[in-house]
Image: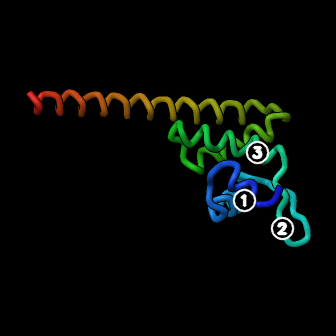
Amino acid sequence: MKIGAFAAKFGIKQVTIRYYVKKGLLNPIKKRTYYEYNQTCVEDMEKILRLKRMNFTLDEIAMYLAYLRLNHSRTFSSKREIMDLLKRKLKSVVTSINELMTAKAQIQQLLH
């Protein structure tokens, strides 16, 4: 599918799709004057959106997708790196939750 249909499928602006291609998050097939977004692109976009909902940065998403794409080599160092990324992200999310819970408690005190 072309970029317009791909962008519409996900409710994302075409400029964002082009940016994701430039960053290497999406790898559409280059046709003469346009890109063709195939099923792999659809699956990658679904992963991107899911990871964004989990507060991953685009750089973290790029690292994760690169790992998945290269995972067939199954090198120990790449597995360790992706596990470290996921552990750091989990720690960051837990910290954010704790900070929000503290803020919630403080606001509730102000209300009373």
Tell me the tag on residue 107.
none
Amino acid type for the residue under numbered disc 2: Tyr
**Residue 8, image x and y in percent?**
68, 54
Would you say 82 lies left or right of 100 here?
right
Q: Residues within 10 Å of mark 3 (few under 14, many from 20)?
A: some
**Residue 39, image x and y in percent?**
83, 44
Quote the CA–CA distance across marks 1 and 2.
12 Å
Q: Nearer the viewer, mark 1 or mark 2?
A: 2
Q: Residues within 10 Å of mark 1 (few under 14, many from 20)?
A: some
Mark 3 or mark 2: name the one nearer the start of the chain. Answer: 2
Determine which residue is flagged by label 3: 42
Q: Which residue appears at 82% of the width and 44% of the height?
A: 40
Instruction: Give the camera-side residue of 101 and 84.
Output: 101
Would you say 61 lies left or right of 56 here?
right
Say above or below: 57 vs 51: below
Amino acid type for the residue under numbered disc 1: Val
Say above or below: 102 vs 52: above
Amino acid type for the residue under numbered disc 3: Val
**Residue 55, image x and y in percent?**
50, 40
Determine which residue is flagged by label 1: 21
**Residue 70, image x and y in percent?**
80, 40
Secondary element at image label 2: loop
Quote the CA–CA distance across marks 1 and 3.
13 Å
Q: Residues within 10 Å of mark 2 (few under 14, many from 20)?
A: few
Determine which residue is flagged by label 2: 34
Q: Which residue appears at 64% of the width and 65% of the height?
A: 15
Q: Which residue appears at 78% of the width and 48% of the height?
A: 41
Instruction: Give the camera-side residue of 37 and 102.
Output: 37
Residues at circles 1 and 2 in contact by the CB criterion of under 8 Å: no
Mark 1 or mark 2: name the one nearer the start of the chain. Answer: 1
Q: Which residue appears at 20% of the width and 27% of the height?
A: 105
Task: Please name the colour scheme applied to the rendered image.
Answer: rainbow
